[in-house]
Image: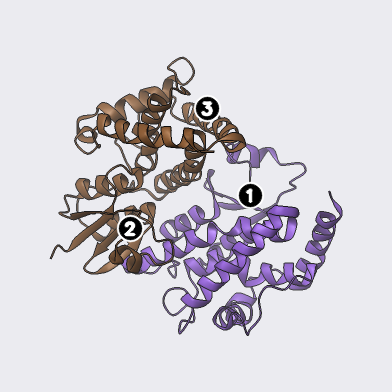
Chain colours: A purple, B brown
Amino acid sequence: MAEVKLLGLWYSPFSHRVEWALKIKGVEYEFIEEDLQNKSPLLLESNPIHKKIPVLIHNGKPICESMVILEYIDEAFEGPSILPIDPYDRAIARFWAKFLEDKVAAVINTFLRKGEERVKGKEEVCEMLKVLDNELKDKKFFVGDKFGFADMAANFLGLWLGVFEEGSGVVLVTTEKFPNFCAWRDEYINCSQNKEYLPPKDELLAYFQARLQAAAASK
Amino acid sequence: MAEVKLLGLWYSPFSHRVEWALKIKGVEYEFIEEDLQNKSPLLLESNPIHKKIPVLIHNGKPICESMVILEYIDEAFEGPSILPIDPYDRAIARFWAKFLEDKVAAVINTFLRKGEERVKGKEEVCEMLKVLDNELKDKKFFVGDKFGFADMAANFLGLWLGVFEEGSGVVLVTTEKFPNFCAWRDEYINCSQNKEYLPPKDELLAYFQARLQAAAASK
């Protein structure tokens, strides 16, 4: 039995954060793909409060919430650190991670909801991109000189947002409007370390195209 | 000039979390009361993204978001630890802190908003209390044997919720319905360490009574 299991979904940015952290640390793990239409007993008993992926199970003990799992992985396993070392830098990384976490819903509303929710979501996403573009001026990453905690929190913008844009035809990000954000995103998608961790874009696009079409067709 | 400054509001549970952490660590600090109608230049330049309290300024460097500040205080200052030591216990504390943070809006909606927002908020608060009551069965605190990170995140339930109930006449918490939560709350209000950190209940009640009346009178 594997010591570390991850209950996740291959297309989920939240699962992906955890996979990324485990790979950085060099932790071997068993990935267990969940079926949201038919959640496994293991998922339901491991995350009885939210009944959501990802859940990391380490020596039989479950940990839930992707950003909480990242902190856990950083503290429980040896290897390169995910959060910076300096307390102030750590606070800055956590600040941006929280900022980003609080905006995930706006991205979902923009592409997978309709009506007023979509309009409000789109406004909020554009506002967020403005803030991030300003923050990433003269910076390659959110904190420090390599991808870390806050960049992992931003992964739904690194790959998934572009997939949503391509799948829906709604384009929010342009190099003219958000040059610094686009530079960060290019680095995110193309840096060699990241590349091998990311789910294949074509498969992601095919999957979400079906989801976006279903959302558009629904009332 | 004080090395540590806290920009806050005496009646805010978010400020109070930070004060509690600083007091546990024995850190001397200057409390600077903000005026939300006329925010100070120091607040605006220290928290340009959210323009909100609390902000901790340590040696001239600002840290924002109360739970991020708590992690910072725990890492940057000597003294009793706020988070548990064991990585798994730390993850559990962070899980509950996030759960609680995500519910603050529901409490505000229940008491300070109207119409549908209020109805939805009330449902969410009752659902949350059920979850917490179940979690606190056979436990005195969220994690471990003393007040810590998750209990600090829960402070808006420890004192403020009761003040809102008393000020509005809307009672959600009874010993019959939520005995374990009530036992935690009694400990929260009455334990000697906590008692000296909490803002005076009478003053809090007088302040929020005016706010609740204004909210009830507004359209």
In the image, B155 versus B98, the foreground residue is: B155
Q: Nearer the viewer, mark 2 or mark 3?
A: 2
Disc 2 and disc 3: Cα gap in Å? 39 Å
Q: How many marks?
A: 3
Q: Secondary structure at mark 3?
A: helix
Q: Is residue B70 above or below residue A80?
A: above
Crowding at label 1, few (<14), some or many (≥20) Cα neighbours within 10 Å? many
Q: Position of residue B59 (x, y in %)?
A: 21, 68
Left or right: B75, with A37 as reference point: left
Disc 1 and disc 3: Cα gap in Å? 22 Å
Q: Position of residue B178 (x, y in %)?
A: 46, 21
**What's the residue type where badge 3 is placed?**
Lys
**What's the residue type where badge 1 is placed?**
Ile
Instruction: Determine if residue A9 is in view.
Output: no
Name the residue rendered at 60%, 75% in the picture.
A194
Q: Which mark is residue B38?
A: 2
Query: Mark 1 and mark 3, same subunit?
Result: no
Chain letter of the residue carrying label 3: B
Q: Is residue A193 above or below residue A65?
A: below
Marks 2 and 3 in Cβ contact (< 8 Å)? no
Name the residue rendered at 25%, 61% in the picture.
B76
**What's the residue type where badge 2 is placed?**
Asn
Q: Which mark is residue A53?
A: 1
Can you identify the residue that label 3 sits on?
A: B130
Q: Which mark is residue B109?
A: none
